[in-house]
Image: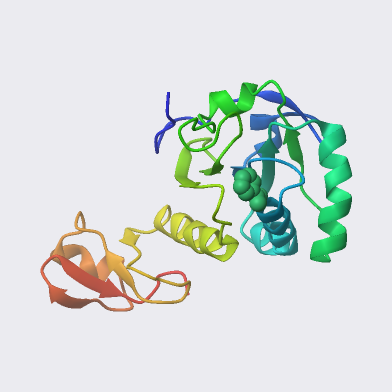
Amino acid sequence: MAIRLGDEAPNFQAMTTEGEVDFHKWLGDGWGILFSHPADFTPVCTTELGAASKIKGEFEKRNVKMMAISVDTVDQHNAWIGDIEETQSCTMNFPIIADPDRTVANLYDMIHPNSLENMTVRSVFVVGPDKKVKLTITYPASTGRNFDEILRVIDSLQLTSKFQVATPANWQDGDDCIVVPAVTDGELAAKFPKGVNRIKPYLRTTPQPNK
Ligand code: BEZ
């Protein structure tokens, strides 16, 4: 069954390029991103893992651990990592799950047979410190992901988990935010001391509270 926002991220034990992991223990108290790619030794996937490894520091700043997965073996992953590092000028620095029997892929509904037979599509799951799924995104095999967009969404998720705000279209960290409808006008001054611009009764903006 498909995993929905707010569901607990299913736990699993799996072999990875960095040894055996228990997913929930590996996550610890922080955030995590689990993302699948169709197969090793394929061009778009090679660029994606290279791009992700280069911005691992940005994920770490946000207390987010990264883990990739495909239905290949550890030996295949390790052989491919050499190609990723050579062609993308990077150092692979996060684990890739080996899931040849598709246990994790099936648990997370990452195989979409009408799109790609027997391989995982490009699924993304962001998991919060409470082990709940905060974001799911699914891309087809033909479209490489934008990891800057994933960072942007994580910034929004982390902000909106702490303050009663939402983030508008194309928001970037530092931009004004939207006050959520649950906050009454009478509460605005106490909750948003930086001020609120009341454009419509339902559209109220405020400077980003944690900046
Ligand atoms: C790729 O990573 O380039 C790819 C993988 C599977 C199908 C199509 C493209």
Left or right of 78 in this view: 210: left
Q: Is residue 209 above or below residue 117?
A: below
- What x and y, as percent, mark residue 72? 75, 32
Query: Is there any visible trace of residue 165 in the rendered image?
Result: yes
Q: Residue at x 27, y 67 (%)?
A: 190
Residue 171: percent from the left, percent from the top? 40, 71
The answer to whether residue 200 is above or below residue 86 is below
Is any part of residue 64 visible from this angle? no
Figure check: 195 above or below 50: below
Please tell me in which quadrant of the rendered image residue 79 appears.
Answer: top right
Q: Name the one closer to the observer, 42 or 161.
A: 42
Task: Name the residue rendered at 25%, 59% in the picture.
Answer: 180
Q: Nearer the viewer, residue 32 or 143?
A: 143
Measured as percent of width and height from the top left, residue 93 is found at 80, 52
- The mark tally for this picture is 0
In percent of width and height, residue 200 lies at: 11, 73
**Quarter that holds the N terminus:** top left
- Residue at image coords 66%, 55%: 44
Q: Relative to 159, is 87 on the left or the right?
A: right
